[in-house]
Image (cartoon, helix red, strand yellow):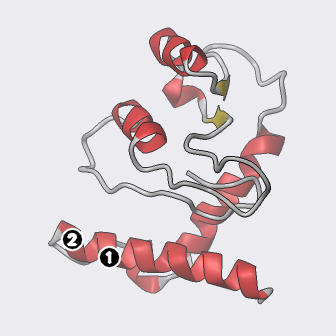
């Protein structure tokens, strides 16, 4: 989960054979950090969720809409007429930034907690570089 500028807010590590849709709701509801810094109550869940066609499920859309989260999920089998690529490019750029770290490009660690530690460190470095302007 990233911000509009591509800063990673929350990550999860799963097995390779687990569908991504099963991780969307825990990531949105459990792993989303409390975001402050602006006047008012801190956000405890995102305002909107942007994904690719792999997450197209009406149940997920309905559940997110019921708690007030706007969804930007293209329908399967349709042409990309709503131009979600313009909104998704910070996400793809962040994934590219993560692949620049050699230990994350190819997973060499057999233990998942080691790979998750490197993933968290990579996300922290991306956030640090953004905050310091490097």
Q: In percent of the image, x 48 and y 18: which residue is there?
A: 60
> In the image, is residue 37 above or below residue 49?
below
Q: Nearer the viewer, residue 123 or 107?
A: 123
Q: In percent of the image, x 65 and y 65: which residue is there?
A: 7
- Could you classify mark 1 by the number of other residues whose Cα lies within 10 Å: few (under 14), some (14-19), or many (20 or more)? few
Q: Tag count in the figure?
A: 2
Res. 100 in view:
yes
Q: Quadrant of residue 81?
A: top right
> In the image, is residue 102 above or below residue 26?
below
Residue 119 percent location from the top left of the image: 41, 72
Q: Relative to 132, is 100 on the left or the right? A: left
Residue 130 percent location from the top left of the image: 73, 78
Report helix, strand or loop for mark 2.
helix
Res. 107 in view:
no
Q: Are marks 2 and 1 in contact (CB under 8 Å)?
A: yes
Report helix, strand or loop for mark 1.
helix
Q: In percent of the image, x 50 and y 82: which residue is there?
A: 101
Q: Relative to 113, is 1 on the left or the right? A: right
> Which residue has dot 2 on it?
113
Q: CA distance from mark 2 to mark 1?
A: 6 Å
Q: The C terminus appears in which quarter of the rendering?
A: bottom right
Residue 133 percent location from the top left of the image: 80, 86
Q: In percent of the image, x 55 and y 14: which residue is there?
A: 66
> Which residue has dot 1 on it?
117
């Amino acid at each position: 989960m990233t911000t509009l500028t591509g800063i990673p807010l929350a990550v999860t590590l799963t097995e390779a054979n687990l569908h991504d849709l099963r991780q969307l709701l825990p990531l949105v509801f459990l792993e989303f950090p409390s975001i402050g810094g602006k006047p008012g109550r801190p956000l405890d869940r995102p305002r909107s969720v942007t994904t690719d066609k792999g997450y197209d499920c009406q149940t997920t859309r309905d559940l997110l809409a019921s708690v007030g989260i706007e969804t930007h999920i293209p329908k399967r089998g349709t042409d990309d007429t709503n131009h979600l690529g313009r909104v998704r490019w910070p996400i793809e750029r962040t994934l590219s930034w993560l692949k620049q770290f050699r230990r994350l490009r190819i997973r060499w660690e057999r233990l998942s907690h080691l790979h998750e530690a490197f993933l968290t460190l990579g996300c922290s470095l991306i956030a640090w570089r953004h905050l310091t302007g490097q």
